[in-house]
Amino acid sequence: MANALVNRAATLNQATNFFRASFSFLRNLSTATPIKDPSIESSADGPKKPKRKKKKNLFEVAQFLPNWGLGYHMAKTHWANVSYEITKINLYKDGRHGKAWGLAYRDGLPIADAPKKISGVHKRCWKYIANLKKPEGSLDQVKEAEESTPNPDVQAA
């Protein structure tokens, strides 16, 4: 009888050992890192592309200029021959948002006498115009210079 009890305990021990081994095997399979084949990886992902650089709004461009860009020309990247000369900036506390006013310029000449509020200052497409030639004097002086220039057609008549 004692012999039967010992045999029965041994078979139970073997059964529990078998289940422990199978469970540990399954656990190791699920947590093991998969082996990657370089040929499969390169065809699926392709070459790694660098992240695209985030474009800047007007305030992020102006923060690196002296006096927050006052007096400097800025334009949206898709504008051709149009820019704003920044005259006033109302900056919010975070330093990346706010309002801005400026004189509009087309082909290097001012469009209007008074500054106007610049729309789209939070759009991420602004750039600094470094080499814009400023005309000599203000808008009134430029108009006077154009009027004082003699017209050859008028003189010939």
Image (spheres, helix red, strand yellow):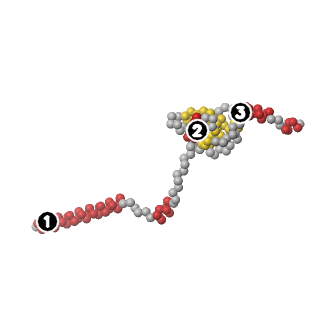
**Residue at numbered disc 1:** 5
**10 Å neighbourhood of mark 3: few (<14), some, or many (≥20)?**
few
Whether residue 111 can be seen here: no
Under mark 3, the amino acid is Gly
**10 Å neighbourhood of mark 2: few (<14), some, or many (≥20)?**
few
Give the residue displayed 77% in from the left and 35% down from the top: 146
Q: Quadrant of residue 148?
A: top right
Which residue is nearer to you in this view: 113 or 66?
66
Which residue is nearer to you in this view: 30 or 70?
70
**Residue at numbered disc 3:** 137
Q: CA distance from mark 1 to mark 3?
A: 112 Å
Residues under numbered marks 3 and 2 in contact, where contact means CB atoms less than 8 Å apart: no
Q: Viewed as shown, does residue 7 lie left or right of 137?
A: left
Q: Quadrant of residue 130?
A: top right
Q: Position of residue 126 (x, y in %)?
A: 60, 42
Which quarter of the rendered picture does the C terminus lie within? top right
Q: In the figure, 18 relative to 79: above or below?
A: below
Q: CA distance from mark 3 to mark 2?
A: 23 Å
Residues under numbered marks 1 and 3 in contact, where contact means CB atoms less than 8 Å apart: no
**Residue at numbered disc 2:** 65
